[in-house]
Amino acid sequence: MSERVPVLRIGDVLLVSIQVDLDDQTVLNLQEDLAQQIVDQGARGVVIDITAVEIVDSFVGRMLATIAAISRMLDAETVVVGMRPAVAITLVELGLSLGGVRTALNLEKGLALLRRSGRSERT
Amino acid sequence: MNVPWAADDEPQTQPVVMNDDVVRVRQFARGLSQRCKLSLVDQTKFITAASELARNTLVYGGGGSCTAGLVRGRGRLGVAAVFEDFGPGIPDIELAMTDGWTSGGGLGLGLSGARRLVDEFALDTEAGRGTKVTVIKWAR
């Protein structure tokens, strides 16, 4: 059984906070939902909060990179926020450094980053 | 690899036949690595390795099982997981262990990445006979 991760909108930014242990199908659903919502809502930025995520394996890591690439094509910028130190260490050792993905330490900094790059006016 | 299962702690076997099972293997690995008192970073590494290998069992092996439990060796406690499938096996082990090489649609980091995340890694496979991957992470 795969769940759907809720996508919230704040101004012109979409916010996704991952709170569950994701199975692969849920990850793929999220990718599609986000792409659709970016277009439907005319979003300019996407923030993915992984504060609660205890592990990011290569599948989830690839999802983050793919979402960043898809949103770029749809004229939105993605920031991944809240990565735990142990997750960062593990990802790099695994061989995934998520080169194309912008990150910020927390939600506030992530939103500020989008504001600075002119991606979000009022959040 | 002969796995030195802790005598007082029976290893448990779980099926790995659907997407949900990968999540269950992760949760199982998390519980074990906490009981083994691995550091937070080592817990994360072990659970991530288990997740990669469970997905391999499911996607490339066509499903199989995961047997995991505590191990004891040289006065240390550790956690081990054995992933077994009866799928097509791996004809070229060296190639399969190469970063970035994949026979499916993945990133090619499953086996090679998992090996970097654990202390001991053994791959037992033969074309047509299935694959068995054993990993151990020791508490420091």
Image: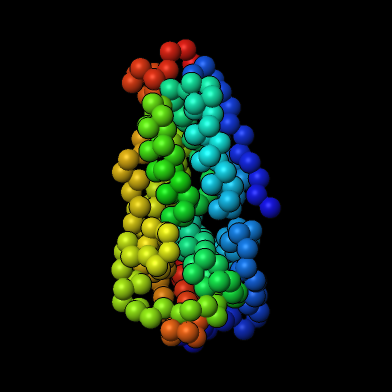
Residue B84 spot, x, y in % from top left? 54, 78
Q: Does any portion of residue A111 appear in the rendered image? A: no
Question: How is the model colour-coded?
Answer: rainbow
- Vertical order, A27 against B7 (above or below): above
Q: Nearer the viewer, residue A105 or B73?
A: A105
Residue drawn at 36 percent across, 35 percent down: A102
Residue drawn at 42 percent across, 49 percent down: A62
Quadrant of the frame with the N terminus of chain B: bottom left
Q: Nearer the viewer, residue B12 or B62?
A: B62
Residue B74 spot, x, y in % from top left? 45, 82
Q: Nearer the viewer, residue B10 or A19?
A: A19
Which residue lies most toward the right here? A1
Q: Is residue A10 left or right of residue B127?
A: right
- Vertical order, A112 against A35 (above or below): above
Residue drawn at 46 percent across, 80 percent down: B89
Residue B86 spot, x, y in % from top left? 55, 80
Q: Is residue B114 left or right of residue B98?
A: right
Quadrant of the frame with the C terminus of chain B: bottom left
- Vertical order, A96 against B128 (above or below): above
